[in-house]
Image (spheres, rainbow, N blue to C red):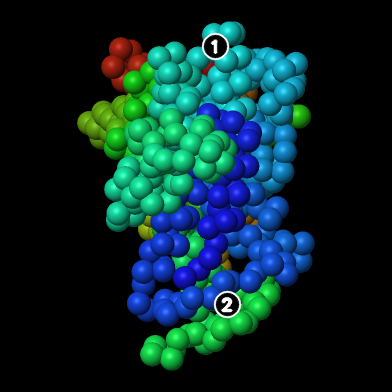
Amino acid sequence: MIMIYPFFFFYITAIINTGISQHPWYFRMAQIMIFAIEEINRSESLLFSMNSTMALMNGSFKIPVSATCDCLSNRKDYPSFFRTIASDYHQSRALAYMVKHFGWSWVGAVNTDNDYGNYGMNIFLNTAQEEGICVEYSVKFYRTETEKLKKVVDIIKQGTAKVIVAFLTSFEMNNLLEQLSVQNITGLQMIGVEAWITAKSLITSKSFRFLGGSLGFAVRKINIEGFSDYVIKEFWDTAFPCSQTERNSSQYALNCSGYQDLLPLKNYNEDVPEQRYASNVYKAVYAVAHSVHSLLNCREQKGCEKGLTIQPQQVSNQFNPVGYYDASLPPDQRFVLNTENIIWVGGQLGPRSVCSESCPPGTRKATQKGKPVCCYDCIPCAEGEISNETDSNNCRQCPGEYWSNAEKNKCILKAVEFLSFTEVMSIVLVFFSMIGAGLTVLVAILFYIKKDTPIVKANNSELSFLLLFSLTLCFLCSLTFIGRPTEWSCMLRHTAFGITFVLCISCVLGKTIVVLMAFKATLPGSNVMKWFGPAQQRLSVLAFTLIQVLICVLWLTISPPFPHKNTKYYQEKIILECHLGSIIGFSSVLGYIGLLAILCFILAFLARTLPDNFNEAKFITFSMLIFCAVWITFIPAYVSSPGKFTVAVEIFAIVASSFGLLLCNFVPKCLIILFKPEQNTKQHMMGKASTKSN
């Protein structure tokens, strides 16, 4: 039999001396200790047939049932301290995981100003920092510090955190509730520890306003078979010396005078099912018994060795750790919480306690100066950047051919821009191009009908028809600039433009030379016209045109134009354009056209004063003036115009210069043919010329 009873009754006596009404919990712990010892004494497999007294008097070892302070885990300072309940290291970390689980990133913290509260809160604060939880304030007080408690409540009242982590004993928690009630501070979500979360003393009619929906960790209740019956009857019948009537009053006074305060607990059994620490006491007694069993070399049938003095250190060496916090498990398995049965304060789905609301996709977090990282502003992502996650720290740049959508939460393909046939600008340009081509064809038809009239036959009608043909091509070549650029269309548009305009200018140049030669031929003894007759005129036009053809062939061979996606001019869209390939090639084409135009202008300007009833050189001069003016202004407009407007400027220059050539060279003749037929005679044209010469 294990002779430990005197120690337990000494413990009970100490409780009585300080007032039993203050220590019913300790009395229950003593009862479970006695219950476990008696159960071991009846066991046939543990310390069997042992009638000696355990001598553990040379030292002490401690197995507490409710001491959770992490400060006691130091094996150097407390070599004989063992636990049947987890230290606050695990509880404090679990509190931080619980706060994170609910998304509460902005909390307040209050703790008892002793080792229990300070160590536990320190672990919570470190874990909260690791988990990205910001603590608005961390304050503490002791049960006797009334003024300090008031300051703590003032800080809570002024704070914006809606969740309070209270690492307090039940005594301090009761004091805190009283002050919260005095100042009527409600709407707080309390997160508690095992010291007060299940304390019945805190459950009152008024406390629900402050504690409703509180969450925390409690010691698990384990039912110990037979303990309830033992407390109700057997303990008082067998273990308590004053439970039976003593016949000898003097003996009763001697034995029972010290235990009068325990008698009121005989009929108070309501708290027995709620004893959460009972299993810890039970396990502690059995742990000691198993250790002693091993040290005494107890064997079945042989019994245990007798007369041994067991040192506390020997007992402690028999213990193995049985509780652990497994940090190797995945994060989603370290902490499990079922929220279905939680009754939140105010009946809400759950309180929100954040310094700043979450930043939606399309924005990034920017920490507010001088405040914790949980306090931030939501800054919209810049153009071309996105964030597709909530509370993103940075926005990321979209790839080259992608751009951010309006919400800045997705990269979408950039819009591809080119001058299409469906745009209003294109329709207007096509309309004028077709009008120009149509008018040119009508003029050609009119000239063909009146091909035998003097005004048509004058100045080489073949060049006139060739000029009308080239003008028609000039109007139509502008259409090749509209539409989606392709490899073939890019090469066609510039070469067609260059060749048709050289053909056109060559015809005008030929007509200008004919005018000059015609008046030179009227001089006595002049034989100029035979050197620039119709055959030479056709050859000159062909030669001028072939030079442009050769330039274009070299351009297309060495570095031809090609479709190009321009992403530099606009960030939000792609300009699909025809890259010139060789700038020298394009400059050569334009330069050759300009050279012929200037030469034609100079010759026409010299011939403008020549006498004639219809001097065509005047109109050629004016047409070349318009042509040069258009293309000189084209260059800066072409360089400065963005995207599809570059193409529109080029088309406009083609159409405008073509209209200038058509109107200046053919409208005067058409007016005479249609409205002044009397002037369309050889006599009229030659007669006035003869009069002037006389």
Between marks 2 and 1 in the image, the one whose residue lies nearer the viewer: 2
Name the side, left or right, on which 267 lies relative to 125.
left
Q: How crowded is the residue under tag 2: few (<14 C-alpha within 10 Å), some, or many (20+)?
A: some
The percent coordinates of residue 448 (x first, y second) are 25, 35
Residue beneath the point at 61% across and 14% down: 179
Is 371 or 290 nearer to us in this picture? 290
Task: Identify whether 30 is placed above or below 357.
Answer: below
Secondary element under disc 1, as helix, strand or loop, is helix
What residue did someone put label 1 on?
181
Instruction: Give the image location of residue 334, x and y in percent.
Output: 45, 57
Left of 632 or right of it: where is 50?
left
Please name the amino acid that badge 1 sits on: Ser
The amino acid on which the numbered mark 2 sits, given as a three-letter code, is Gln
Q: Which residue is mark 2?
A: 318
Question: Quarter-wise, where is residue 44 in the image?
Answer: bottom left
Q: At 54% across and 86% down in the image, what residue appears? A: 305
477 over 619 or under it: above or below: below
Quarter of the image that includes the C terminus: top right
Q: Nearer the viewer, residue 1 or 615?
A: 1
For this rendering, which residue is in front, 262 or 617? 262
- Residue 270, quarter of picture: top left
In this rendering, the count of numbered labels is: 2
The picture places residue 189, in percent across and down from the top left corner, at 48, 26
Q: Residue at x 55, y 19 (%)?
A: 177
